[in-house]
Image (cartoon, grey):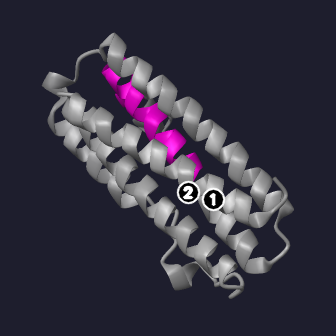
């Protein structure tokens, strides 16, 4: 899979499938935090699919690698994550423990995001063009953010008290 077109094409497919899985999970859950998490991730995966498709099209047209900013590529999910957890803290009463089905979805998402980190890290290691390297580095960062979001929301769902204690540990430590 040394060919950049193969990497980009496979990336498009992976992002499409992952986005569809997150959208389905969002539609099927009644838990507000999980729904917000999966909706945000579905939107992010759709954006990644668009970015990869745009790079693929440019490569096919022999137009080279544009700077990621030119296509609006971003790894920043901080605002989305803040909004998700602000919503969660407002709905603690309904949070409760995650049901088994939701835990399975989170576990699958965490595994898939970990695989994406590896996939884009490998693509980054093969890239020689500075803009290609910047693009794949941005995707690695974004996938790590997805992984963190899934891990933190799963922890929140599984043990809300522990999550708050960990998040506010700096107060205890002084």
Image-quadrant location for residue 150: top left
Q: CA distance from mark 2 to mark 1?
A: 5 Å
Relative horizontal placement of residue 151, taking residue 123 as reference (left or right): left
Q: Check disc 2: other Cα within 10 Å, few if <14, some if 14-19, many if 20+.
A: many
Q: Is residue 17 visible?
A: yes
x and y, in percent, of residue 26 in the image: 27, 37
Residue occupying image coordinates x 62% and y 71% = 56
Q: Which residues are magenta?
A: 143-165
- What residue does disc 2 label? 12
> Farthest residue in the bottom direction?
63
Q: Are marks 2 and 1 in contact (CB under 8 Å)?
A: yes
Residue occupying image coordinates x 63% and y 83% = 67
Examine the rendered structure and indicate whether residue 13 appears above or below residue 31. Answer: below
Residue occupying image coordinates x 48% and y 77% = 72
The number of numbered discs placed on residues in the rendered structure image is 2
Q: Looking at the magenta stretch, what is its main secondary structure?
A: helix
Q: Which mark is residue 9?
A: 1
């Amino acid at each position: 899979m040394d060919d950049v077109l193969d990497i980009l094409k496979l990336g498009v497919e992976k992002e499409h499938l992952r986005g569809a899985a997150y959208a389905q999970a969002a539609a099927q859950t009644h838990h507000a935090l999980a729904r917000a998490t999966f909706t945000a991730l579905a939107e992010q995966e759709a954006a990644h699919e668009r970015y990869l498709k745009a790079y693929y099209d440019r490569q096919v047209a022999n137009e080279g690698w544009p700077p990621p900013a030119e296509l609006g590529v971003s790894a920043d999910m901080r605002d989305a994550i803040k909004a998700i957890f602000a919503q969660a803290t407002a709905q603690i009463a309904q949070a409760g423990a995650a049901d088994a089905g939701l835990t399975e979805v989170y576990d699958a998402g965490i595994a898939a995001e970990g695989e994406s980190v590896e996939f884009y890290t490998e693509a980054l290691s093969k890239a020689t063009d500075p803009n290609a390297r910047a693009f794949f580095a941005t995707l690695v960062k974004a996938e790590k953010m997805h992984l963190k979001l899934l891990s933190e929301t799963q922890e929140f769902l599984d043990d809300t008290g522990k999550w708050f204690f960990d998040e506010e540990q700096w107060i205890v430590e002084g």
